Image (cartoon, grey):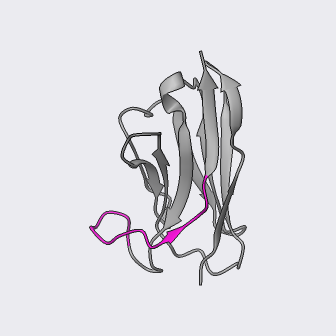
Amino acid sequence: QVQLVESGGGSVQAGGSLRLSCADSRHTDARHCMGWFRQAPGKEREEVATIDVDGSTTAADSVTGRFTISRDNVKNTMYLQMNSLKPEDTAMYYCAAKLRGLKCNNSFAFVYWGQGTQVTVSS
C-alpha cells in the first residue's frame, strides 16, 4: 500500500521559491495518478496540480506559470516547484495518489494522502 511523505515546506518571502517533494516510503510501483492539494485556514481544500504516469499534467489557474509539477518514476517521488510565491499561496500542502492504474482525468477520488507540509509566504 502507498504511504506518502511530503517534505520541503517552510517560510519564504513573497517572490521566493520552494520545492516540495512527495515520496512513497513503501516504494510501491509508480503507476499512480498523483497530485498536490492545499488548504488554507478557513478555506476548502483545492487541487493545485496533477501528474499522470505518462507525465501529462494539469494545474490550477491560480498557479499556472508559477508552479511546476513533475515526477521521477524510478525514485517514486513527485515534486512541486513553486516560484514567484505570493502570500495567498500560504497553506498546508498535501500530496495524494489514486489507486494504481487510474488515470488522472476521471472522477475517481484520490485515496492515498500524505500528512501535509506547511508553506508560509510573507509579504
Residue 104's quadrant in the figure?
Answer: bottom left
* Picture coordinates of residue 98, whole percent (x, y): 44, 72
Q: Position of residue 91 (x, y in %)?
A: 53, 39
Q: Is residue 32 above or below residue 1?
A: above
| Main secondary structure of the magenta stretch | loop
Q: Residue at x 57, y 26 (%)?
A: 85
Q: Residue at x 48, y 46 (%)?
A: 38
In the displayed structure, 41 sits above or below 113; it is above
**How many labels were placed on the picture?**
0
Quadrant where the C terminus is found in the figure: top right
Q: Is residue 66 visible?
A: no
Q: Nearer the viewer, residue 39 or 14?
A: 39
**Residue 106 belongs to the span the image colors magenta:** yes
Question: Which image quarter is the N terminus in?
Answer: bottom right
- Along the line of sight, the residue nearer the viewer: 38 or 48: 38
Left or right, 59 with reference to 81: left
In the rendered image, residue 70, in percent from the top left (x then y), is placed at 58, 52
Residue 30, by quadrant, is: bottom right
- Residue 50 in the figure: left or right of residue 121: left
| Residue at image coords 28%, 67% | 106
Residue that extends furthest to the left in the rendered view of this protein: 107
| Rendered image quadrant of residue 12 | top right
Quick one: which residue is furthest to the top in this view?
123
Queried whether the magenta region covers residue 66, the answer comes back as no
| Residue 82 image position (x, y, % from top left) | 59, 35
Q: Which residues are magenta?
A: 103-116
